[in-house]
């Protein structure tokens, strides 16, 4: 089975955009999304990030199916400041694997393409490790958790660019460390994990994932976050059955996949389904 890789580049010049599209013939099963930006919007500008986000959403939305394994990476030149990093992370951090290209390659289209072509091959073992955690070990891994709604130090750490500048062996150690910490939240004799708000997150059985919309979310970040986590595909329909441990009905304020708060107390629900991208089902 082939694995499609969606490569998104933020803030390309028209000439670089054309150069990057040459990668399609050089790298197997690669789809390039590199919107050409006017001079005033190149680099990690708000306009460039927004254009890349919407174009990626459109490209992925055209796929005949969203159930197959796939990869999703986002590329740009190194951010000039923390704000630029925050902007790209807010849009793509939960869904994509983000790579920054050395600043000295700016305005060098050919060398930039060559750098990406070489580096993308090196990503294979990295994304394999991520996929093992996100897909194969989804029921015990903290890397599939809804990051806004499962409150813990581990999920807080995953909301930053935790893998930046790390090599494969270092990434494996981070995955192992966080998995061990997450395991400590599993109540003995049960499949659920308890967060800092005393909410119990029980991973859905495979049979409970069938028939669920995939990916969930009607806006770009939610849709991408429902399809991918840190650059690899999520298991179709995977979610958590969430209920309180110290009350009969949910009392917490949850956050949906669009970032909106939802007070659960008035709804008097005993449980709710929460997907990795924080999509809440049933919807309000």
Image (spheres, rainbow, N blue to C red):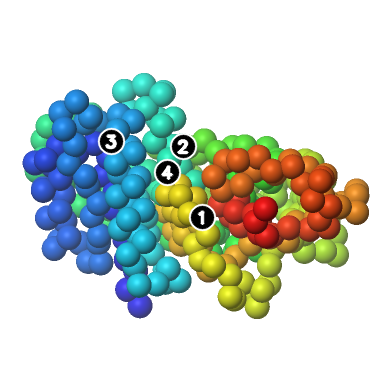
Which circle marks residue 217 in the picture? 1
Cα distance between the residues tagged 4 and 3:
13 Å
Q: In this view, does 92 lie above or below 25?
A: above
Mark 4 and mark 1 residues within 8 Å of each other at the beta carbon: no
Q: Is mark 4 on a helix, strand or loop?
A: helix
Crowd tier of the residue under label 4, counting other residues whose Cα lies within 10 Å: few below 14, some 14–19, many 20 or above: many
Inspect this view and state whether residue 186 appears.
Answer: no
Cα distance between the residues tagged 2 and 1:
16 Å
Q: Identify which residue, 233 or 271, lies in the foreground.
A: 271
Cα distance between the residues tagged 2 and 4:
6 Å
x and y, in percent, of residue 271 in the image = 78, 58
Mark 4 or mark 3, which has the lower sequence index?
3
**4 vs 1, front mark:** 1
x and y, in percent, of residue 21 in the image = 15, 53
Q: Is mark 2 on a helix, strand or loop?
A: helix
**2 vs 1, front mark:** 1
Q: Name the residue under label 3.
A: 48
Taking the image as shown, residue 155 lies to the left or right of residue 160, namely right
Q: Residue at x 16, y 49 (%)?
A: 20
Q: Name the residue under label 2.
A: 90
Q: Residue at x 82, y 64 (%)?
A: 190
Q: Which residue is drawn at 30% across and 44% down?
A: 52
**3 vs 1, front mark:** 1
Mark 2 and mark 4 residues within 8 Å of each other at the beta carbon: no
Crowd tier of the residue under label 3, counting other residues whose Cα lies within 10 Å: few below 14, some 14–19, many 20 or above: many
Mark 3 or mark 2, which has the lower sequence index?
3
x and y, in percent, of residue 174 in the image = 55, 45
Q: Mark 4 points at which residue?
A: 92
Q: Is mark 3 on a helix, strand or loop?
A: helix
């Amino acid at each position: 089975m082939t694995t499609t890789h969606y490569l998104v580049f933020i803030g390309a010049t028209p000439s670089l955009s054309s150069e990057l599209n040459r990668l399609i013939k050089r790298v197997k099963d690669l789809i390039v999304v590199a919107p050409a930006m006017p001079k005033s919007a190149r680099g990690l500008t708000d306009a460039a990030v927004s254009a890349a986000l919407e174009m990626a959403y459109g490209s992925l939305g055209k796929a005949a199916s969203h159930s197959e394994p796939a990869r999703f990476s986002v590329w740009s030149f190194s951010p000039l400041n923390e704000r630029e990093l925050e902007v790209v992370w807010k849009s793509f951090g939960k869904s994509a694997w983000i790579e920054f290209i050395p600043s000295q390659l700016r305005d060098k289209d050919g060398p930039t393409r060559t750098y990406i072509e070489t580096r993308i091959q090196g990503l294979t073992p990295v994304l394999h490790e991520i996929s093992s955690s996100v897909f194969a070990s989804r029921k015990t891994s903290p890397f599939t958790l809804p990051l806004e709604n499962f409150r813990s130090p581990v999920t807080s750490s995953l909301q930053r660019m935790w893998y930046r500048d790390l090599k494969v062996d270092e990434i494996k150690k981070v995955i192992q460390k966080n998995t061990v910490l997450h395991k400590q939240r599993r109540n003995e004799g049960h499949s659920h994990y308890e967060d800092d708000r005393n909410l119990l997150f029980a991973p859905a059985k495979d049979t409970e994932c069938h028939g669920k919309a995939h990916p969930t979310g009607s806006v770009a970040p939610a849709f991408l976050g429902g399809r991918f986590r840190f650059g690899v595909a999520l298991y179709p329909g995977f979610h958590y059955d969430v209920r309180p441990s110290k009350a009969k009905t949910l009392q917490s304020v949850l956050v949906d996949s669009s970032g909106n708060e939802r007070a659960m107390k008035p709804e008097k629900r005993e449980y709710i389904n929460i997907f990795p991208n924080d999509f809440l089902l049933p919807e309000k």
